Image (tube, rainbow, N blue to C red):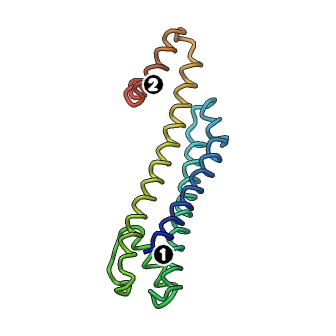
């Protein structure tokens, strides 16, 4: 059980460190600055593609941690099988063509739930970046529009902050 909790902790730590580092990189990205000055979608799209690449790399590394552990503890016959089993389990595909020995079987559901949670964190992170980009673009548009009075700009800002989903959809 301790080994399983250790793998879970390593996975969460890797993912958290990766997301924190990536958030700093994204917030300093020229693509977000470009969304304040241009209406072109190419810089933010390229940013999102790179974010997905890094997220996928994080997941692959996390799968590898579990797979190497299975191989090291001889729970799988070879490293290829261990990595394959880990990937299928982490992604909750569960083909069932490979099984852990009876004494290791409780690792599989823990790895599957861990994969679901890390996938959820990645999804939330991806949508947070979309939200940041959308808010920057909308606020840049609000404050550069000459047809809006100061009160109208203040009203839009309040609406978007108080009721973000409704405010963004209305705007």
The answer to whether the residues at label 2 and label 1 have Cβ atoms under 8 Å apart is no
Q: Residues within 10 Å of mark 2 (few under 14, many from 20)?
A: many
Residue at screen point 49% across, 74% down: 66
The mark found on residue 155 in the picture is: none
For residue 99, side relative to residue 43 (left or right)? left
Q: Quadrant of the N terminus?
A: bottom left
- Using the rendered view, name the quadrant where residue 162 is placed: top left
Question: Residue 138 placed where, x, y %?
Answer: 52, 27
Judging depth in this view, the residue of 72 and 93 nearest the camera is 72
Judge whether 97 appears above or below 152 on screen: below
Residue 37's quadrant in the figure? top right
Q: Residue at x 46, y 59 (%)?
A: 118
**What is the x, y in percent for residue 84?**
45, 79
Mark 2 or 1, which is nearer the eye?
1
On the image, numbered disc 2 is attached to which residue?
160
Label whose residue precedes the other's in the sequence (2 or 1): 1
**Residue 133 in picture, x, y percent from top left:** 54, 37
Measured Cα–Cα span from mark 2 to mark 1: 47 Å
| Local secondary structure at mark 2 | helix
């Amino acid at each position: 059980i301790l080994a399983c909790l250790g793998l879970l902790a390593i996975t969460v730590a890797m993912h958290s460190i990766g997301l924190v580092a990536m958030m700093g990189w994204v917030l300093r990205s020229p693509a977000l600055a470009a969304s304040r000055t241009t209406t072109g979608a190419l810089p933010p799209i390229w940013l999102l593609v790179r974010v997905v690449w890094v997220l996928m790399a994080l997941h692959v590394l996390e799968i590898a941690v579990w797979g190497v552990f299975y191989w090291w503890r001889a729970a799988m016959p070879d490293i290829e099988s261990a990595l394959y089993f880990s990937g299928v389990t982490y992604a909750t595909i569960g083909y069932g063509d490979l099984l852990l020995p009876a004494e290791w079987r409780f690792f599989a559901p823990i790895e599957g739930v861990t994969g679901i949670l890390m996938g959820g964190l990645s999804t939330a992170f991806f949508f947070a970046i979309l939200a940041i980009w959308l808010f920057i673009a909308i606020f840049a548009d609000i404050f550069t529009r000459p047809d809006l009075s100061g009160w109208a700009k203040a009203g839009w800002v309040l609406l978007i902050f108080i009721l973000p989903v409704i405010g963004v959809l209305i705007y």
